[in-house]
Image (spheres, helix red, strand yellow):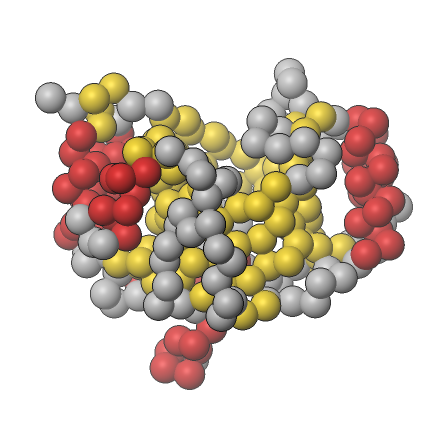
């Protein structure tokens, strides 16, 4: 019998920018007074580690590079090497909107999926688990990269507003130990340590105070994709 799963669906609009170090400090100072840290960390931030999956035909990567109107990501995510669970997530993105469906799975089941055994998703009485099993088992999904970065995240307790600042972005391929306590020595850095990826996510309303803070920053459109950057080796084959 399938077990009742802990699941979550989040739908938001999204804006994505690159920040320099000076503007990062200005923004953090403002957000510390306007919003509160999210549930996974405090004002110092925390590390995020994700294992991404793709099909044998690299469909998700190809559709992203070809700038399809609709793209998806399939990943496992954890916030601590000591975690007893992980999040299995299917992220669906349109031009400026996204829906992220997630289900919490056990550490053991996450490790099985990394080995290619998606049958463990049948244990969970959850639509995300069901869809994930169909996608991964029928399209030959397998782990293709592991991405890690430091995140500082803010939310509002009463509105669907979330702002994240991600730095120290790095990735590796052919190594997918989601729960390793030792830093992997062969990570590849994606961007300079002085740069930060800023993501502003909200439902239908973004606070005027936050809009005002953002207008004072030297924001640049962010060309960096965590998933895409980790698959840069494929560019020579497809583009």
Identify the residue at the far bottom of this view. Answer: 236
**Image location of residue 157, percent across then percent down:** 65, 18
Identify the residue at the far left of this view. Answer: 1
State whether residue 66 is above or below residue 3: below
Taking the spot 21% from the left edge, 37% from the top edge, the residue there is: 121
**Image location of residue 10, percent across then percent down:** 47, 30
Q: Is residue 186 left or right of residue 121?
A: right
Nearest the viewer among 112 and 211 is 112
Q: In which quadrant is the N terminus drawn?
A: top left
Q: Quadrant of residue 131?
A: top left
Q: Is residue 135 visible?
A: no
**Image location of residue 234, percent across then percent down:** 40, 76
| Number of numbered labels in the structure image | 0
Q: Is residue 152 left or right of residue 49?
A: right
Q: In which quadrant is the C terminus drawn?
A: bottom left
Taking the spot 42% from the left edge, 51% from the top edge, the residue there is: 180
State whether residue 156 is above or below residue 140: above
Q: Quadrant of residue 127?
A: top left
State whether residue 227 is above or below residue 164: below
Nearest the viewer among 106 and 77 is 106
Q: Is residue 196 visible?
A: yes
Q: Is residue 185 left or right of residue 157?
A: left
Nearest the viewer among 230 and 81 is 81
Identify the residue at the far front of this view. Answer: 182
Nearest the viewer among 57 and 203 is 57
**Image location of residue 126, percent across then percent down:** 26, 26
């Amino acid at each position: 019998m399938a077990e009742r799963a802990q699941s979550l669906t989040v739908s938001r609009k999204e804006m994505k920018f690159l920040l320099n170090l000076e503007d990062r400090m200005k923004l953090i100072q403002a957000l510390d007074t306007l919003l509160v840290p999210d549930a996974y960390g405090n004002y110092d931030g925390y590390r995020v580690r994700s294992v991404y999956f793709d099909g044998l035909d690299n469909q998700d990567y190809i559709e992203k590079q070809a700038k399809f109107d609709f793209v998806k990501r399939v990943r496992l995510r954890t916030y601590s090497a000591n975690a007893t669970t992980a999040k299995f997530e299917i992220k669906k993105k349109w031009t400026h909107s996204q829906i992220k469906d997630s289900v919490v799975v056990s550490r053991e089941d996450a490790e099985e999926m990394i080995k290619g055994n998606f049958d463990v998703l049948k244990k969970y009485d959850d639509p995300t688990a069901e869809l994930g099993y169909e996608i991964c088992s029928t399209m030959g999904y397998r782990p293709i990269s592991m991405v890690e970065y430091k995140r500082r995240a803010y939310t509002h307790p009463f509105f669907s507003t979330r702002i994240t600042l991600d730095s120290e972005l790095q990735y590796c391929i052919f190594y997918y130990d989601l729960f390793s306590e030792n830093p992997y020595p062969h990570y590849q850095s994606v961007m300079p340590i002085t740069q930060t990826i800023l993501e502003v996510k909200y439902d239908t309303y973004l606070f005027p105070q936050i809009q005002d803070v953002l207008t004072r920053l030297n924001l640049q459109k962010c060309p960096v994709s965590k998933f895409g950057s980790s698959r840069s080796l494929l560019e020579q084959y497809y583009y």
